């Protein structure tokens, strides 16, 4: 006979669960804040001081050091003297996470369009009663957004940003001032979400559309439109998820400014992305598929699904409903285990990557499947959480890569948990 759990017990359990997740969010933000949001990153090997000391600049040596930092199961970055820096996209994620925490604690009201008194948020009743650490999360968010503006890439048609370390590609070297659409889109999203902190943020963010159109070569193709991912991208390939992220940025701007040109350009990109969907419901990393070693990997497919969900939420259109349904089914049933564990791609289970966990939490939160989002959180806390706010990078079949990357692990999990908690608090999905 099935034992029925009393309603008041289930309610108490849910409240306790939410309280525990708030504690994990506090700890994760505290871990980053104590380090000034600086740390190692996924592809930061080229910032090795050993390389800088060498009298030569050789592509293959650069790639060897870059991969030596990235691939081993132990962290060799300290031995390579890799610098710990703020990552541009990671800073945007931390800014939004801090702002979400401020919302959860009631530090300010999003409806306040006249700007926020940052000094007052440190001593208001909500802060004193609900957060014993005394952290002013609103001020943290403000300072991080100011950093995004101060450290944007210069010399382009509009607001943009990129990784703050060099990257060696096979066909060229990316420099710290080089922007890309992925980093830029998250910075735009952060500035728009922080509009109550400074009414100038949205107008700065809007200029990113000029960067996308002029500098990333927005161009028509037979079934829609394409943009470049970054300036060192091979001309004979297209990175599909980067296009979707660019379209989501345009939709974010359209949601704020109601400029139909932004919506039309977003639709052009998404029409092309939809046309590239495979029969099983997912997308390869690049078109043609042979242009990348990645296939239909987890978190990049999550980016595309999120972009389509965001379009539907903002416009109310059913333009991509069929694609959303099929891609969500593929994402849920092929790229995740029933336990909430992320699979690597459509054919491989391992490695189980924390970035895939975080993106899954976001997608299922936004799609309304909070139960499965919570299942992913539970798996991640059980398998990739060290404690005291520190997350690990990857779980392999026989071992776990116990490396903490500030953007890849910390920023993504802080943002994912904060968005999930906002959904719980609001009784509905947060704005994507």
Image (tube, rainbow, N blue to C red):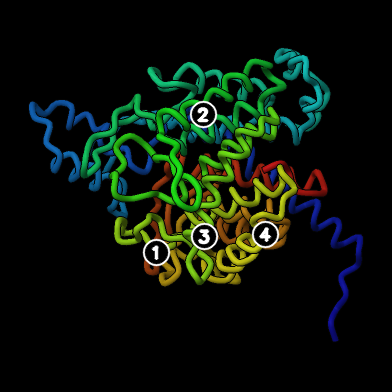
> Which disc is residue 383 wearing?
3
155 versus 399 height, above or below: above
Q: Nearer the viewer, residue 430 or 77?
A: 430
Where disc 1 sits, the SS reads loop
Q: Nearer the viewer, residue 208 or 301?
A: 208
Q: Nearer the viewer, residue 263 or 109?
A: 263
Q: Is residue 55 left or right of residue 300?
A: left
Mark 2 = which residue?
34
Mark 4 = which residue?
321
Q: Are marks 3 and 4 in contact (CB under 8 Å)?
A: no
Label 4 Cα neighbours within 10 Å, binned few <14 / some 14-19 / many ≥20: few
Q: Are marks 2 and 4 in contact (CB under 8 Å)?
A: no
Q: Residue at x 48, y 22 (%)?
A: 158
The spot of residue 115 in percent (x, y) is 74, 15
Q: Is residue 60 left or right of residue 326?
A: left
The spot of residue 320 in percent (x, y) is 64, 56
């Amino acid at each position: 006979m099935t034992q029925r759990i009393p309603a008041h017990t289930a309610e108490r359990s849910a409240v306790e669960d939410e309280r525990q997740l708030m504690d994990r969010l506090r700890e994760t933000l505290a871990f980053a804040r104590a380090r000034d949001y600086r740390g190692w990153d996924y592809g930061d090997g080229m910032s090795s001081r050993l390389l800088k000391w060498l009298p030569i600049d050789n592509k293959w040596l650069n790639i060897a050091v870059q991969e030596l930092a990235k691939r081993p199961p132990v962290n060799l970055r300290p031995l390579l003297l890799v610098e710990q820096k703020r990552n541009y996209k990671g800073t945007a994620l931390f800014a939004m996470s801090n702002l979400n925490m401020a919302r959860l604690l009631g530090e300010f009201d999003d409806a306040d369009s006249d700007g926020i008194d940052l000094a007052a948020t440190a001593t208001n009743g909500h802060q004193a009663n609900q957060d014993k650490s005394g952290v002013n999360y609103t001020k943290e968010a403000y300072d991080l957004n100011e950093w995004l503006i101060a450290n944007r890439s210069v010399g382009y048609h509009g607001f943009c940003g990129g990784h703050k370390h060099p990257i060696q590609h096979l066909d060229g070297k990316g420099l710290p001032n080089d922007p890309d659409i992925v980093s830029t889109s998250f910075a735009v999203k952060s500035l728009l979400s922080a509009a109550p902190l400074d009414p100038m943020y949205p107008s700065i963010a809007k200029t990113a559309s000029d960067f996308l159109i002029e500098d990333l070569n927005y161009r028509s193709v037979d079934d829609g439109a394409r943009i470049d991912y970054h300036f060192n991208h091979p001309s004979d390939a297209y990175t599909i998820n980067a296009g979707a992220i660019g379209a989501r940025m345009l939709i974010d701007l359209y949601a704020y400014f109601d400029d139909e040109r932004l919506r039309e350009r977003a639709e052009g990109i998404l029409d092309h992305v939809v046309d590239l969907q495979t029969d099983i419901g997912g997308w390869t990393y690049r078109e043609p598929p042979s242009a990348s070693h990645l296939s239909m990997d987890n978190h990049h497919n999550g980016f595309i699904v999120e972009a389509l969900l965001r379009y539907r939420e903002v416009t109310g259109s059913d333009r991509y409903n069929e694609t959303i349904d099929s891609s969500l089914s593929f994402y849920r049933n092929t790229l995740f285990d029933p336990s909430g564990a992320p699979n690597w791609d459509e054919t491989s289970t391992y490695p189980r990557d924390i970035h895939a966990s975080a993106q899954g939490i976001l997608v299922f939160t936004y799609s309304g499947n909070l139960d499965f989002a919570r299942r992913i959180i539970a798996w991640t806390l059980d398998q990739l959480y060290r404690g005291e706010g520190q997350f690990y990078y990857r779980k392999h079949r026989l071992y776990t890569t116990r490396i903490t990357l500030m953007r890849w692990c910390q920023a993504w999990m802080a943002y994912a948990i904060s968005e999930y908690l906002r959904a719980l608090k609001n009784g509905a999905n947060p704005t994507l």
